[in-house]
Amino acid sequence: MDETFEFENFENLKLEFQDLSDELLIAFSNFIIENLEQAETIEEKRNKLSEKKSIKCLSLDILILCMKETIEKDYKKVGKERKAQKWDFKYFLTFSNHDNKTLTIYNRLHPKKIEVGYLFYPVLSIRKYESSYYHWSH
């Protein structure tokens, strides 16, 4: 698999990638440590993140494993349709709101031959609350 990941624009705190690798998982960890701020609550109503639907991760290592599993499931699920429709794709990690308390990984799909029309959808979200991480699969 092609290992493509980069901090495209550090001012916007965006990490884009197509395939998972050990280096990318380390980059996730570093990004989370350096940028994710403690939330005042576990839940976030704006993005419909309820505590009931979250997975509580007691460490960053556990969170990274949950993220990896969720991304791999999405990659497999969308892979067949992506190939059949001849879509390009790129995942990207960014903050959901104008604060640094909810990180979301989105998948961006678009036709290979047409320069218009993108489909974005959230794959997962994470928040940090009282020294634990909370993970939501969308």
Image: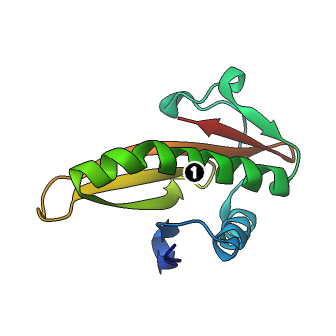
Q: Amino acid at mark 1?
A: Ile
Residue sitting nearer the eye, 33 or 81:
81
Residue 118 seen in the current view: yes
Asked if residue 100 is positioned above or below residue 20 in the image, the reply reads above
In the figure, is residue 99 to the left or right of 112?
Answer: right
**x%, y% of residue 53?**
66, 25
Residue 101 is left or right of residue 9, and the answer is: right
Q: Is 56 situated left or right of 79 in this image? A: right
Image height check: is 31 above or below 82? below
Residue occupied by mark 1: 71
* Residue 103 visible in the shown view: no
The image quadrant that residue 86 belongs to is: bottom left
Residue at left offset 49%, top offset 31%: 46
Query: What count of labels does the image hold?
Result: 1
Q: Nearer the viewer, residue 61 or 43?
A: 61
- Around disc 1, counting alpha carbons within 10 Å, would you say few (fewer than 14), some (14 to 19), or many (20 or more)? many
Q: Residue at x 82, y 50 (%)?
A: 62
Q: Residue at x 69, y 40 (%)?
A: 135
